[in-house]
Image (cartoon, grey):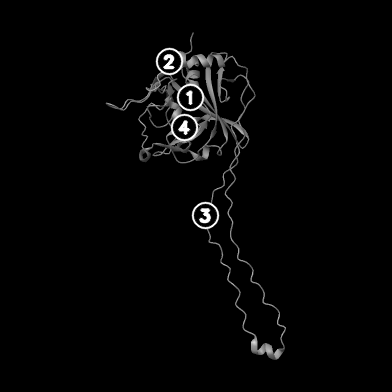
């Protein structure tokens, strides 16, 4: 990985002033309106203006009123479930310095030397099997809990500045080798009924077999670069931008991954969303990445 390529633009960005907090859009699509057709009312017959004798000879019985069909009753399980409205964004302290144009990546340096990276994203999925914990916008929202408007290269660079060392993604031939790299503790800060809460990200993920919380920390695998052979002068593509920013299944392109064998085959996925602990869809969430490194004496 070209360390200079990753760090130069970020170092320039670190000099920028902290900007006002922004949150991802929280407008929730309106529920689909359903209309039920109603039959027109039966038109009354005109009043009889003939004499009683003529009426007895010409009057015919009136047609019976049309029957109104009741709309079919939908089973409860087929009714559209109403989601709770999104929560407001958690507060972002002044000491968290934005380092990208979208103001979704923040860098923090404490007085004791601790350095952390914070990502401002939003909830995009609350139930079902998972391959990824956090993805880039418009990539793997269908199998990730959090999405974020980021360039994963900038997260990589920020983690290097925070003291993490990139290892290598999982390898599958000739035999499986788990991903390596600095251990990264991941926490989430969000609002629950207005109150700010912070919890390990592992509480939002559970083992499909045991039902228990995720039992592993992630490692900084570092993804990989792809160089276009037809355009060798172009900037290499950072493969984690395909969606595998913080993975739960082993991918060769993951920026962060679990240091255990975890299948990416749909039928064998090991993890699923812990729905009861995850905020409503589109709720903003601050995902904190803290490298576990030895402090310099």
Query: Counting other residues with Cα less than 10 Å from the Cα at mark 1, is it few (<14), some (14-19), or many (20 or more)?
Result: many
- Residue at mark 1 to residue at mark 2: CA–CA distance: 14 Å
Residue 24 location (% of width, % of height): 59, 32
Q: CA distance from mark 2 to mark 3?
A: 56 Å
User: Viewer-proximal residue, 212 or 157?
Assistant: 157
Decide which of 113, 126 is in the foreground and name it. Answer: 126
Q: Does dot 4 land on a helix, a strand or a loop? A: strand
The residue labelled by disc 4 is 133
Q: CA distance from mark 4 to mark 3?
A: 31 Å
Labels in figure, total: 4
- Of the numbered discs 4 and 1, the one sitting upstream in the chain is 4
Residue position marked by numbered label 1 in the rendering: 152
**SS for dot 3:** helix
Tell me if label 3 and label 1 are in contact, CB under 8 Å. no
Q: Earlier in the sequence, mark 1 or mark 2?
A: 2
Q: Which residue is mark 3?
A: 76
Foreground mark, 3 or 1, reads 1
Q: Earlier in the sequence, mark 4 or mark 3?
A: 3
Dot placed on the residue nearer the N-terminal end, 2 or 3 = 2
Secondary-structure class at tag 2: loop
């Amino acid at each position: 990985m070209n360390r200079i390529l990753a760090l130069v633009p970020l170092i320039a960005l670190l000099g920028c002033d902290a900007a006002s907090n922004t949150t991802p859009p929280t407008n929730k699509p309106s529920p689909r309106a359903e209309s039920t057709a109603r039959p027109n009312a039966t038109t009354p017959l005109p009043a009889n203006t003939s004499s009683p004798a003529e009426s007895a000879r010409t009057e015919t019985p009136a047609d019976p009123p049309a029957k109104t069909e009741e709309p079919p009753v939908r089973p409860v399980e087929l009714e559209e479930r109403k989601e709770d409205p999104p929560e407001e964004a958690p507060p972002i302290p002044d000491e968290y310095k934005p380092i990208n144009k979208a103001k979704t990546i923040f860098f923090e340096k404490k007085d004791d030397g601790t350095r952390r990276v914070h990502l401002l994203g939003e909830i995009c999925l609350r139930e079902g099997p998972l391959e990824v914990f956090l993805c880039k916008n418009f990539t793997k929202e269908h199998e990730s809990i959090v999405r974020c408007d980021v360039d994963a290269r900038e997260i990589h660079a920020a983690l290097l500045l925070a003291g993490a060392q990139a290892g290598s993604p999982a390898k599958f031939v000739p035999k499986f080798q788990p991903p390596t790299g600095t251990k990264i503790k991941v926490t989430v800060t969000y609002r629950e009924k207005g109150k700010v809460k912070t919890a390990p990200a592992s509480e939002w993920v559970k083992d499909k077999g045991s039902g228990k919380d995720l039992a592993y920390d992630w490692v900084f695998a570092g993804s990989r670069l792809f160089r276009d052979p037809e355009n060798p002068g172009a900037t290499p593509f950072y493969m984690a931008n395909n969606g595998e920013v913080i993975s739960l299944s082993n991918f060769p392109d993951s920026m962060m991954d679990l240091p255990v064998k975890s299948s990416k085959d749909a039928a064998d996925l090991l993890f699923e969303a812990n729905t009861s602990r995850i905020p409503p869809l589109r709720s903003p969430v601050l995902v904190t990445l803290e490298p576990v490194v030895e402090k310099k004496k």
